[in-house]
Amino acid sequence: MLRYFLRRVGGAIPTLFIIIAVSFFLVHAAPGGPFSTERNRPAEIEANLKRAYHLDESVPLQFLRYLNGLAHGDFGPSFQYKDFSVSELIARGFPTSMMLGAIAISAALLIGLSAGIWAALRQNSAADYGVMGLSMTGIAVPNFVVAPFLTLVFGLLLHWVPVGGWDHWSNIILPAIALGLPNVAAISRLMRGSMIETLRSNYVRTARAKGLREWTTLTRHAIQAAILPVISYLGPAVANIITGSVIIEQIFSIPGIGRYFVLGALNRDYTLVMGVTIFFGLIIITCNLITDLLYGFLDPRVRYD
Amino acid sequence: MASLIRESATTEARSADVTARDIASSMTAEEVAGRSLWSDARRRFLQNHAAVISLIVLIIIAAASFGAPYLGLRDQDDVNYDMMPAAPPDFATGYFFGSDANGRDLFVRTLYGGQVSLTVGAVATLVSLLIGVAWGATAGFIGGRVDGAMMRIVDILYSIPFIFFVILLTVVFGHDIILIYLAIGAVSWLDMSRIVRGQTLSLKRKEFIEAAHASGVSTFNIVRRHIIPNCLGPVVIYVTLTVPTVILTESFLSFLGMGVQEPQSSWGTLISEGARSMEIAPWGLLPGIVLAVTLLCLNFVGDGMRDALDPKDR
């Protein structure tokens, strides 16, 4: 178990390093520095600015300096929001994004699993086709199409929920639905497929044959095994939620990290974009790692060597 | 005696020659059978109503998009001051989707946007196809340590959030549309390489490849006549499933204002404009429906292809 753990962690570190290195060198390959504007500054000011941000040093030295900063949780200064460091901006947006993401993913799990199990138990019925049709739509239709439609119907026409902002609990409903929907679709599809396969397996037949009640057969035997593919989907789901949050926070004007990322990208705030990319990378890798470990822990068939 | 041996040897040689010719002719027979695999697949595909209807819808959307300049419609930049700002759809005047905030025909803009989105789909998928097939086939063919190293790289790349790198790339190097095509393609080849590698690896050990080797077919011809045609099924399936994800990625970028720039438009930019003014002009979301329909159809066609080419998988 320990070896398995170490091997997985050992696999995550080069990935993180690649993310950091590629982002760093990409940004440093950018034509023009972060301070090149149309206005011409006196050379001394330019030089002072560069010295203040250590841009006069060699690139490898800057990289080491950046790595050292990252190790201490310092993502460097933001070149656009001059009063903030990138870490401060991330710290500001993270609680909001985290809350939205957590609600979206919990709801997606709850609804997706129930829908998938329900469809599997009524395979080839109208309910099954209905769930799978909706799921196909949920996977194919992007959330930046779904979100405006939700806003139009439930916000502007029916006035059930506010269309944007972030000061009341009802603000979270539409964004969470828009963010969770593709995952509901994917989870219900996965769960249905794996549940159908499990229900056909010998040990479920044995459980039924020995006279277990259907409910016990399902909860104690079938679902426990059928849920494994969904567990391994959790890593990608988190990545999906993070990518989606960039769009959703933009549409619903939610002050999360995704919004800073987009603003940074549109303002060409290199360090902010680089910092957030690395931060997102870190979260996704961590979640993939946790998913892997959880899977190894839950599935007795996984060998630890 | 010696002559007898020589004779039997020549007979043997002749019979070997005959066998070779048999194999050769059976190979042409196999080619016919191979073609019938595709006609089988075509038959199965045509029986799948959802896939066929989707394909027809897609063809109509593509034909309308690329044929837009020849349909005698307005130009995408034509501004109608009577339709400004945003006027609702009006079939009498031919504004099927209404007009946008600048009084431009939204239907025409959707068609032109389709040109960009569909081209991205095609070009980026082609890029991912080339990289993925080359990477996967090399790893599968060479095998051993090289294979291990190459697939380890793919594993590492898998857990990298690529969309953010594409954004970083556009931030750093500007919103060049060619760059976007290439960048999206360059980040979506991972699944393709895994599929091709797996396929090559299993094909390499198949009896008919061994038979081809034994009957003296050159490596190049084995790859050309046997490996590639046998890889084609899964690759075609995967290509049809890559196109929608690629179109989605481009729309995602354009929606955020990091993809296609004015005066060009793609479905992503149109949806973003529409979402901004939907309080006064909800018809601005119609391009979103077109995108959704296209993506759904592509998915149905992809599923249809899978069922047609890989009936085991049903």
Image: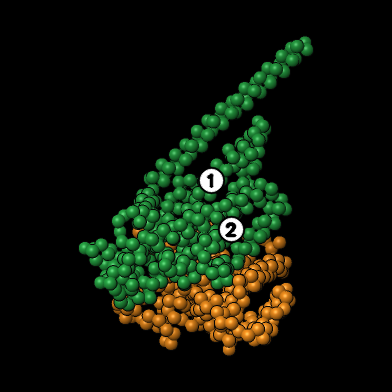
Colour of chain A, in one word, is orange
Residue sitting at the far right: B2
Name the spot of residue A130 as percent of width and height, x first.
37, 61
Name the spot of residue A305 as percent of width and height, x first.
71, 61
Q: Is residue B109 left or right of residue A71?
A: left
User: Looking at this view, is B77 or A187 the one in front?
Assistant: B77
Residue corresponding to mark 1? B232
User: Looking at this view, is B57 or B122 the one in front?
Assistant: B122
Name the spot of residue B310 as percent of width and height, x first.
49, 46
Residue at screen point 39% across, 55% down: B66
**Chain under label 2?**
B
Residue corresponding to mark 2? B190
User: Looking at this view, is A263 or A173 the one in front?
Assistant: A263
Name the spot of residue A142 as percent of width and height, x first.
43, 66
User: Can residue A250 be seen by looking at this rendering?
Assistant: yes
Look at the numbered disc 1 and give the secondary structure of its residue.
helix
User: Looking at this view, is A245 or B103 the one in front?
Assistant: B103
Q: Earlier in the sequence, mark 1 or mark 2?
A: 2
Residue at screen point 60% across, 84% down: A41
**Residue A25 sits above or below residue B58 on the image:** below
Three-letter amino acid code at disc 2?
Answer: Leu
As drawn, the chain in green is B
